[in-house]
Image (spheres, rainbow, N blue to C red):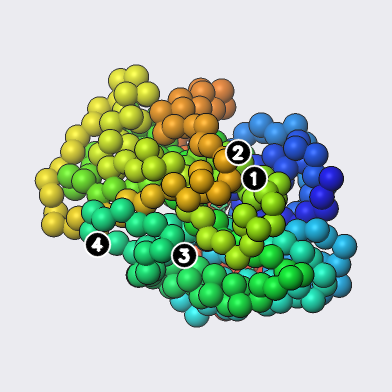
Amino acid sequence: MKKLLVTGTGGYIGCMLGPYLEKHGDQVTGVDTGYYLDGWLYNGLRQTPKMIIKDIRNITTQDLEGYDAVIHLAELSNDPLGQHNPEVTYQINHIGSVELAKRAKAAGVQQFIYTSSCSVYGVGTDDIKNEETPPQPQTAYAQCKVLVERDVQALADDHFSPTFLRNATAFGASPRMRFDVVLNNLSGLAWTTKEIRLTSDGSPWRPLVHVLDICEAVRCTLAAPRDAVHGQIFNVGDTQANYRVREIAEIVSETFPGCGLSIGKSDGDNRSYRVSFDKIKACLPDFQCKYTPRHGAEELRKVFEYIDMSSDTFQFRAFTRLKQLKHLINTHQIDEQFFWREM
Ligand SMILES: NC(=O)c1ccc[n+]([C@@H]2O[C@H](COP(=O)([O-])OP(=O)(O)OC[C@H]3O[C@@H](n4cnc5c(N)ncnc54)[C@H](O)[C@@H]3O)[C@@H](O)[C@H]2O)c1
């Protein structure tokens, strides 16, 4: 049994990852500042690990003592959030993450797993990107991912072993739902409006991965021999799961009975990225994606049926990361640096 600290357990992936790792026999403590704790779509978890409410920027070396591994997810988690305030994004996502890794190393933590993103590849061509492809980040969010990979890689030595998991775009059900990722968003639209209208022709490619397959990649990284993962970057997903946006829309509309689908004309914006996920399969033979986008859409339909999801719930601010952060700013609950204000 390993003693694990998982950051971001109040979020979409982290909320599923903590219980997943506990179910596989590890002992998990979560940390999160709690930006999205207003949102809990459904109660689908049997056990949740204990969660410390703390900003990663305030985590001390002492807080990190005694853990075998840190799995770090807690960041501002998408491009629109990053673009909304690039300065704070650098403070949390770049500086905050690198300082956390340095403190983990100082505390004697042996392994550090960082959830990076396929968005580091940027956009542009139909070429298939792999881990050797030079990153071309287009946004503050993606730029920070590249900077964290670089700076945490530099900390790797005999006593500190980082691994960088570049996740595809996630989908699937989680109590701390995100409706601002493509498949979940389209599924919510299909359920609440019975119509998906793409304004463009939907030709861009998007690699997708189920939230539980991301959890499995973390589990496999923790279980792997050190040499297989030390200092390594892995794209997390399945090479078969590079879809065009219109294919994702088709899958969703087929899964939600009575849902119409209309596809627009090419708007000349053909920004795409296709990704190879062959390396993770080769280096972590236990890893395999179990869930397709069709499984994800079906799972979401069942959850929506189960909770009789209303339009208001679908549009609730806490399920769209940027809406919730704007709400916390506008209601003066967090300050300019996104620290909670004392009331
Ligand atoms: N969801 C995806 O499609 C996807 C794809 C690739 C990579 N990732 C990465 O995976 C990680 C988790 O993503 P997610 O979808 O669960 O995002 P999320 O926004 O649902 O969760 C992030 C969590 O981090 C917390 N957090 C943010 N800043 C913090 C801080 N300063 N201190 C403490 N906690 C803080 C938030 O409160 C939130 O609970 C992120 O690093 C994200 O960039 C996600």
Asked if the residues shown at circle 1 and circle 2 are in contact, with their CB atoms under 8 angstroms apart, the answer is yes
From the viewer's perspective, is residue 58 above or below residue 215?
below
**Residue at the location (32% across, 24% down)?**
254
Dot 1 lies on which element? helix
Q: Quadrant of residue 67?
A: bottom right
Residue 68 visible? The answer is yes
- The answer to which of marks 2 and 3 sits earlier in the sequence is 3
Q: Which residue is mark 2?
A: 286
Q: Which residue is mark 3?
A: 81
Q: Nearer the viewer, mark 4 or mark 2?
A: 2
Dot 3 lies on which element? helix
Mark 4 crowdedness (10 Å alpha carbons): few <14, some 14-19, many ≥20: few
Q: Position of residue 275 (x, y in %)?
A: 37, 51
Q: Position of residue 54 (x, y in %)?
A: 75, 65
Label 1 to label 2: alpha-carbon separation? 7 Å
**Residue at the location (61% across, 73% down)?**
152
- The answer to which of marks 4 and 3 sits earlier in the sequence is 3
Label 4 to label 2: alpha-carbon separation? 32 Å
Dot 2 lies on which element? loop
Which quadrant of the frame does ligand 1 lie within? bottom right
Residue 104 visible? The answer is no
Label 3 residue near ligand 1, CB within 8 Å: yes
Q: Quadrant of the N terminus?
A: top right
Mark 1 crowdedness (10 Å alpha carbons): few <14, some 14-19, many ≥20: some
User: Residue type at mark 3?
Assistant: Leu
Mark 2 crowdedness (10 Å alpha carbons): few <14, some 14-19, many ≥20: some
Residue 124's disc is: 4
Q: Nearer the viewer, mark 2 or mark 3?
A: 2
Q: Nearer the viewer, mark 4 or mark 1?
A: 1
Q: Is residue 125 left or right of residue 2?
A: left
User: Residue type at mark 2?
Assistant: Asp
